[in-house]
Image: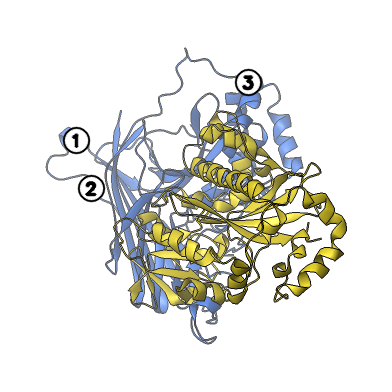
Chain colours: A yellow, B blue
């Protein structure tokens, strides 16, 4: 059940104002329970702008108050920083494991742990350039994190700011010394709208080629940043699945030599492991020395959900409202 | 006494037609360890290409290169000069952990990685049980030697009986194999017994009494190391002590972690691969002024590249000595990667590498 739907713009191409009452009436029962925490709502202007963009705007800010939004955004930011620290640790020293905060089994037993990327250093320290975080509201009215995706975040609709923030983060992740990076979106065959919105080149695996640790688009222009929507397994047939035609052989060694940045980083999948998720509040404390702002929800069915996107450009973690979602 | 060894590892690949966009990684450079020092090492390729090196997760030095232009031959020559020492053994003063300590401690630290089975080192519970029965009442070191002896007793050394992707279980069932199979089976049983174990890949000078200045036939070799307070080597193929004759190149969980050569290319699926390892014991440095030791060449192994789906010829296979006969089978040329933009009738990307999922058996 999507609570956010009480807002008219939560529905694709929904009517702007007239439908509002009707939708609210449908959900009046739930609405009463939430009325107390509902704060100021986004302006109609903002909604119109977003609808004009042709994409369904997330109704996130409609379901939660401004005050609560700040808390949620801080909590999500904190999580992303903890996930970054976790991934740097997994592919680095393994401090948390040696200290007994996490069991080594979590790494060595995971199929998502990619030994191949050891030694690949992200230029601005960012591995989670973009993430999707799913929140649910518990019985007590508080939001908790149900899960996160730091590999290839799902979604076919993107909130208004998303493409420009993402492009900013990708450009910020360019290899050292590249002032005007050439960014390419590597797709298994879809997602053209996002490339259009970001204003970057769309490429399939066959469009890319590697030579002496440099990546070229159609054999001509050197690529500096690859935002990939191709899973780790298919990215580089030299290191992963040899039968893959979706990626390009040599990509990983190019990233290792520092001439190209792959976003999100290869090997992030381990942070999405179901075993890691419950440990995250503890990891916030361990890596950041902070109290966790958001708890972790029990897996299962939840009625009142919300998906947020985060974009990390090295200095800021932007939290962007995503879309309401049912359990 | 220290040995100084000169190793020349030559891999020749001949393709039946032109090959392009070939990406390769060679793991052929000996490590520098307390018991061995790599004095000089070099990997060169023909056709000429810059060779880029990096250290992988296991600490192995990897030589990577790519060849975009069409070519029908590939030569990889890895040379190294290594000074080796006998394995010093464990000082008697050093306390040796018992079973209780090993089983209590190892699964909770980094050693866990060398306790978990991999696809190539997974064996059935029956085999594990049989091994456990055999080591009943022995201390960890005795148990490791007993397991090694059991593997030697079970598996007859027979080149050509197994393939590069043969698992420990298959080697046990077949009762035949080469050093790679025996090492992987030993690793599997050591892990089953609770001893962290790793697969070691390198070179062996086969003559224990080789005098300085004498040479002998060299070969690629695989053996194991187990952890009982410290890492200790064990050579299940020969049962001999691991010492000056052994040169370590790479260590991992199984062969798939340390393939001497892996690569992928566009071109015909069939390739002839010839691997030659020459190991020469050099005279001690003081005597080496002037002419170096006599250099004897020997063709050690010949690995043919037919693969089930015609895609993979891998390896500079370890210990896969085969009679030198020329057999070449051409598989139909197939397109293998839609993403590489090849028409169906044109050659697709080919791959040679150790792939634990493969079941390519060059029988």
Residue B151's disc number: none
Cα separation between marks 2 and 3: 50 Å
Residue A250, x across and y down, in percent: 42, 64
To which chain does the residue with label 2 belong?
B
Judged by depth in the image, the label closer to the viewer, 2 or 1, is 1
The residue at which mark 1 appears reads as B285
Query: Which residue does the numbered mark 3 point to in the structure image?
Result: B101
Q: Secondary structure at mark 1?
A: helix
Q: Are marks 2 and 1 in contact (CB under 8 Å)?
A: no
Within 10 Å of disc 3 (Cα), the crowding (few <14, some 14-19, many 20+) is few
In the displayed structure image, the side of residue B148 where residue B250 appears, left or right = left
In primary-sequence order, the first of circles 2 and 1 is: 1
Q: Residues within 10 Å of mark 2 (few under 14, many from 20)?
A: some
Question: Which residue corresponds to mark 2?
Answer: B294
Mark 3: secondary structure: helix
* Residue A185 visible, this angle: yes
- In three-dimensional space, the C-alpha distance between marks 3 and 1, rounded to whole angstroms, equals 44 Å
Marks 2,3: beta carbons within 8 A: no
Q: Left or right: where does residue B2 sit relative to residue B162?
A: left
């Amino acid at each position: 059940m999507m609570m956010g739907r009480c807002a008219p713009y939560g529905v694709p191409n929904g009517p702007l104002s007239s439908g509002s009452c009707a939708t609210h009436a449908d959900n009046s029962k739930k609405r009463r329970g939430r009325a107390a925490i509902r704060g100021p709502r986004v302006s109609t202007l903002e909604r119109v702008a977003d609808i004009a963009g042709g994409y369904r705007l997330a109704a996130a800010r409609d379901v939660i108050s401004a005050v609560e939004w700040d808390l949620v955004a801080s909590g999500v930011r904190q999580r992303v920083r903890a996930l970054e620290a976790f991934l740097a640790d997994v592919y680095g020293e393994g401090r948390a494991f040696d200290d007994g905060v996490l069991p080594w089994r979590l790494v060595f037993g995971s199929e998502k742990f990619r030994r191949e990327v050891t030694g690949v250093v992200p230029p601005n320290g960012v591995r989670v350039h973009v993430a999707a975080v799913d929140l649910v509201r518990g019985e007590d009215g508080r939001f908790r994190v149900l899960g996160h995706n730091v590999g290839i975040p799902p979604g076919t609709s993107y909130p208004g700011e998303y493409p420009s923030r993402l492009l900013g983060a990708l450009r910020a992740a360019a290899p050292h010394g590249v002032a005007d990076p050439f960014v390419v979106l590597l797709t298994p065959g879809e997602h053209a709208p996002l490339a259009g919105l970001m204003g970057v080149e769309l490429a399939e695996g066959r469009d890319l080629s590697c030579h002496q640790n440099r990546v070229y688009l159609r054999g001509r222009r050197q690529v500096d940043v690859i935002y990939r929507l191709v899973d780790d397994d298919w990215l580089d047939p030299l290191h992963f699945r040899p039968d893959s035609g979706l990626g390009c052989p040599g990509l990983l060694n190019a990233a290792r030599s520092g001439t190209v940045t792959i976003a999100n980083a290869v090997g992030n999948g381990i942070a999405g492991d179901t075993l890691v998720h419950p440990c995250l509040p503890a990891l916030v404390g361990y890596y950041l020395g902070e109290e966790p702002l958001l708890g972790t929800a029990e897996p299962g069915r939840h009625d009142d959900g919300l998906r947020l996107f985060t974009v990390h450009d090295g200095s800021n973690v932007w939290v962007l409202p995503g879309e309401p979602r049912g359990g | 006494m220290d040995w100084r060894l000169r190793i020349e590892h030559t891999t020749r690949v001949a393709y039946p037609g032109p090959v392009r966009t070939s990406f390769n990684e060679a793991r052929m450079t000996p490590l520098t360890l307390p018991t061995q020092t790599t004095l000089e090492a070099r990997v060169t390729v023909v056709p000429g290409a810059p060779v880029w090196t990096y250290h992988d997760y296991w600490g192995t030095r990897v030589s990577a290169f790519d060849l975009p232009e069409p070519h029908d031959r590939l030569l990889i020559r890895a040379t190294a000069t290594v000074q080796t020492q006998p394995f010093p053994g464990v000082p008697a003063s050093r306390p040796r952990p018992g079973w209780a300590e090993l089983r209590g401690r190892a699964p909770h630290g980094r050693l866990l990685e060398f306790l978990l089975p991999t696809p190539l080192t997974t064996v059935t519970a029956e085999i594990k049980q049989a091994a456990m029965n055999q080591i009943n009442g022995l201390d960890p070191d005795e148990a490791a030697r007993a397991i090694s002896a059991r593997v030697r007793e079970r598996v007859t050394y027979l080149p050509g009986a197994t393939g590069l992707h043969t698992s420990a279980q298959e080697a046990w069932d077949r009762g035949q194999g080469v050093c790679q199979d025996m090492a992987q089976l030993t690793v599997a049983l050591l892990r089953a017994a609770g001893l962290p174990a790793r697969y070691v890949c390198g070179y062996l000078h086969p003559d224990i009494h080789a005098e300085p200045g004498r040479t002998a036939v060299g070969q690629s070799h695989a053996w194991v190391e187990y952890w009982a307070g410290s890492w200790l080597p064990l050579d299940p193929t020969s049962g001999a002590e691991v010492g000056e004759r052994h040169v370590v190149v790479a260590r991992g969980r199984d062969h798939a972690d340390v393939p001497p050569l892996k690569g992928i290319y566009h071109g015909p699926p069939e390739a002839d691969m010839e691997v030659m390892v020459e190991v020469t014991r050099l005279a001690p440095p003081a005597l080496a002024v002037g002419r170096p030791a006599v250099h004897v060449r020997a063709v050690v192994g010949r690995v043919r590249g037919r693969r089930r789906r015609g895609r993979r010829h891998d390896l500079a296979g370890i210990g896969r000595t085969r009679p030198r006969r020329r057999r070449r089978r051409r598989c139909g040329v197939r397109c293998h990667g839609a993403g590489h933009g090849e028409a169906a009738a044109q050659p697709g990307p080919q791959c040679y590498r150790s792939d634990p999922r493969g079941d390519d058996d060059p029988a």
